[in-house]
Amino acid sequence: MDSLLILLLYVTGIVGWIVLSAIIAKMARNAGKSAFGWLLLSLFFSPIIGVLFLIASCLATINYRLAQDPVEDASRHAQRGESWLCPTCQHENPSSAVECADCGHKLK
C-alpha cells in the first residue's frame, strides 16, 4: 500500500511539473517569446525558475522599448508613411500628427 501511495505522489509531481511548464510556455508565447524554448527551460530546470526568467526577460524588453528615442521613431514612421496609434484612446493618426485627432494626447 505504501509503494502505491509513493508511486501516486511521484506521478502527481511529474504531471504537475509538466503542466506548470506548459503554462509558462503559453505565457511566453503570449509575451512574444519562443514557447518551445521556455517550455524546455522550465522542464529541465524548474517551472519556478522558468517563470522568474520569463518575468526578467519581459521587463528587459519593456525597458529596451522605453529607452528608444521617440524622435527617431517618429522619423522612421514618417519615412515609411506609417501611422501612430494614440496610447490613450488607440485612435490611428498619421505619422506627421503632433497630437491625437480624437483625444488631443501629444504623440511626439
Image (spheres, rainbow, N blue to C red):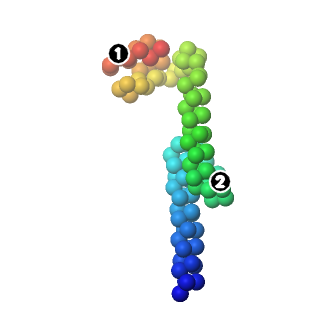
Query: What residue appears at the point 53 percent right and 77 percent down from the top-left corner?
Result: 8
Q: Residue furthest bottom?
A: 1
Read off the residue under disc 2.
Answer: 41
Could you tell me the amino acid type at mark 1? Gly
Disc 2, SS: helix
Q: Residue furthest left?
A: 103
Q: Earlier in the sequence, mark 2 or mark 1?
A: 2
Number of numbered markers: 2
Read off the residue under disc 1.
Answer: 104
Query: What residue appears at the point 38 percent right and 17 percent down from the top-left corner?
Result: 105
Disc 1, SS: loop
| Nearest the eye: 12 or 89 | 12
Does residue 56 sit above or below 36 in this rendering? above
Q: CA distance from mark 2 to mark 1?
A: 45 Å
Mark in the foreground, 2 or 1: 2
106 sits left or right of 80 in the view: left
Q: Position of residue 72 (x, y in %)?
A: 59, 16
Does residue 46 sit above or below 98 in this rendering? below
Could you tell me the amino acid type at mark 2? Leu
